[in-house]
Image: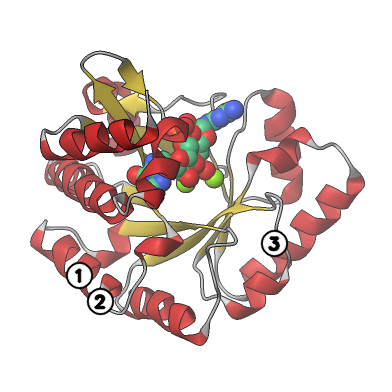
Amino acid sequence: MREDELAGRLRHALETGQLVAYFQPQYDLKTGRVVALEALCRWNDPDEGLLMPDRFIHLAEQHHLIADIGRVMLEESGRRAADWHRRGVSVGLSLNVSPSELDAGFAGRVLRRIHELGLAPGDVTLEITESPAMRETDEEVGWLQELIDGGAGVSIDDFGAGHTSLDILRHVPFTELKIDRSLLADPSEGVDALVASAREIAHARGARIVAEGIEDEKDLARVLAWGCDRGQGYHFSPPLPAEQLGPVLESAAG
Ligand code: C2E
Ligand code: MG
Ligand code: MG
């Protein structure tokens, strides 16, 4: 399919509710309890089936549809999270945000919508992917700080993937640091040293550190040795459609 054709279909998908949120549980590594759910976007295409973000997020960026995806995800997952809370399940909600969605009005819009959905800002963490698109200008830093000042969480996602430096942690405000799973795949001591430094900076700032992509016992042992606060990965659970979250929500409530 040609790219502009695919972009047209994505626009249609956004308008007709074909974009859905899957949820992957995040665990407190000390208590073993589910403490949050990360919303991950899926495109339920009537012809092609379930499409993963690597098929369309990049396209959405290029065709200025990424903010629309962000809005749909906040609406859908926010409504579900408010419902879980009403049923006594207090789990946090993490949403992925592309740096290109950030602008002067972003924090205000998101905080207002969180409130209207019946959630508290502290229930929601916005995961910003660490990427070259993140410009780390004073302006951008200010917009992220506005989210934190409003009570929401800001997570630096994919820390350690490619273009990392510890420098970003000194410039950008954050309440959570998410270690990219590529670091788990690299057994070198250099990685352990990088994570140790990152953890020190994060904890000194009062931020938590989360490991993603924990696939087996060996990964989990390393993540525990790193001193991570939370973990996420296939070892615990894959991302699930909301209808299949029953047991996860029960364990979070119990
Ligand atoms: P991410 O935010 O870093 O999400 C983690 C990705 O790792 C997810 O891929 C998840 O399904 C996958 N994963 C989880 N556990 C494991 C594991 O144990 N092993 C392996 N190999 N993979 C694991 P997914 O859902 O395909 O999403 C890919 C990326 O697309 C996300 O990376 C995020 O950057 C982006 N994305 C997803 N949903 C949204 C969205 O609503 N908005 C924006 N802007 N980006 C999104
Ligand atoms: Mg993420
Ligand atoms: Mg990530």
- Position in image of residue 198 (x %, y %): 71, 63
Q: Which residue is mark 2?
A: 105
Task: Determine whether the beta carbon of the residue marked 3 sits less than 8 angstroms from the nearest atom of ligand 3.
Answer: no
As measured in the structure, the alpha-carbon distance from the residue carrying label 2 to the one carrying label 1 is 6 Å
> Amino acid under label 1?
Arg
Residue 55 in view: yes
Q: How is the image coloured?
A: secondary structure
Q: Residue at x 30, y 38 (%)?
A: 7
Q: Give residue 109's mark.
A: 1
Q: Residues within 10 Å of mark 3 (few under 14, many from 20)?
A: many
- Side (left or right) of 224 relative to 19: right
Q: Nearer the viewer, mark 2 or mark 3?
A: 2
Nearer to the camera, 139 or 146: 139
Q: Give residue 28's mark.
A: none
Q: Residue at x 15, y 69 (%)?
A: 112
Does residue 116 sit above or below 62 in this rendering? below
Q: Which residue is mark 3?
A: 199
Does residue 44 sit above or below 31 in this rendering? above
Q: Residues within 10 Å of mark 1 (few under 14, many from 20)?
A: few
Q: Residues within 10 Å of mark 2 (few under 14, many from 20)?
A: few
> Amino acid under label 2?
Gly
As measured in the structure, the alpha-carbon distance from the residue carrying label 2 to the one carrying label 3 is 31 Å
Q: Are marks 2 and 1 in contact (CB under 8 Å)?
A: yes
- Position in image of residue 231 (x %, y %): 56, 41
Which quadrant of the figure contains the C terminus?
top left
> Amino acid under label 3?
Arg
Q: Secondary structure at mark 3?
A: helix
- Position in image of residue 40 (x %, y %): 37, 38
Nearer to the camera, 45 or 29: 45
